[in-house]
Image (cartoon, helix red, strand yellow):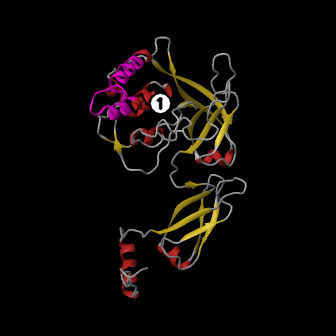
Amino acid sequence: MLSFGPEADVEFRDYYQTLGVARDAPAEAVKKAYRRLARKYHPDVSKEADAEKRMKEVNEAYAVLSDPGKRAAYDRLGQGHRPGQDFHPPPDWDANMEFSDEGVSGSDAAGFSDFFAEIFGRAHGMGRPGSANRGAFRDHHARILLDLEDSFHGPERQISLQSPRVDPDGRLRLETRALNVKIPKGIREGQIIRLARQGSAPQGGDPGDLLLEVAFRPHPRLRADGRDLHLTLPVAPWEAALGAVIPVDLPGGGIQVRIPAGAAPGRQMRVRGKGIPSNPPGDLYFDIRVVAPPADTPRTKELYEALRKESDFDPRQHWGRES
């Protein structure tokens, strides 16, 4: 799958400019441009001072634009960017795009740029065991976004996937297909749903499988980490000071959590078995956040004044000396 880590921005590369072709150039025009530039810059024959560097750039551009999946991904990301501009892919940009497991090998891509590695480093089976063509079979894969609630209920969802295809004129087209997918209860981010024989079929061969990698859409309150769930729980000052039992809604049903008296802001607590219902189930972790009510009525102002007079609490007593 196409995925990104927390690395710093990289410089955008215009592969079309590198090969000197238009963005809608057909496959044959891309191939001809590559052959022309390869004759010009191949280190064995070129007299250009920067031949080796230019040849690497040409090879990288051709590796992307000659592959329908990579070219479709690059086209989706590259709109509105200029060469040399800082580039950072937006999150979940590749959701519901279908790719084949064919790709550039890790050794072939060793000299390619950080820009290439940022987008394609773990895509299309590069460096991934078992991702090569299996005889007449060809697996496809896609990254799909689910709601966190789907992991608790295991529903059936209709998934629309876009798949790049080259038409008879050699031009790249995106085709959309819809699939009904049963979501396994307890599924976690990063896990794979395998749909047998839903991949593509080479000429004269049988279809491979379709591998769907699961990711969760952002949830308004919860964050999944493997089997576990995390949330920040707002509590009133008196609930933190005196203790309380607070209802918490979860996708699997509501629970009651007990806040002990004297709970400090930022304290993390755990409820066992209330995370994602996998086997074994995960836990629920919550951090306490004390929220003070505003002094927006005469009565609350009166209460705050009374508390200020009666209490000798100094919130800055240990300021700067906490470990």
Q: Is residue 264 above or below residue 274?
A: below
- The picture places residue 121, in percent across and down from the top left corner, at 48, 41
Q: What stretch is highlighted in magenta?
A: 29-58
Which residue bears the numbered disc 1?
A: 70
Of residues 116 and 257, the one drawn nearer to the viewer in this rendering: 116
Quarter of the figure with the C terminus = bottom left
The question of residue 227 being in magenta is answered with no
Q: Is mark 1 on a helix, strand or loop?
A: helix
Of residues 172 and 179, the one drawn nearer to the viewer in this rendering: 172
- The picture places residue 106, in percent across and down from the top left corner, at 51, 39
Residue at figure coordinates x 65%, y 30% from the top left: 180
Of residues 182 and 63, the one drawn nearer to the viewer in this rendering: 63
Amino acid on which disc 1 is placed: Lys
Q: Is residue 128 above or below residue 19?
A: below
Residue at figure coordinates x 70%, y 31% from the top left: 196
- The picture places residue 245, in percent across and down from the top left corner, at 60, 70
Residue 112 is drawn in which quadrant?
top left
Spot the residue most to the left: 49
Residue at figure coordinates x 67%, y 26% from the top left: 137
Q: In this view, does 118 lie above or below 58?
A: below
Q: Is the magenta stretch mostly helix, strand or loop?
A: helix
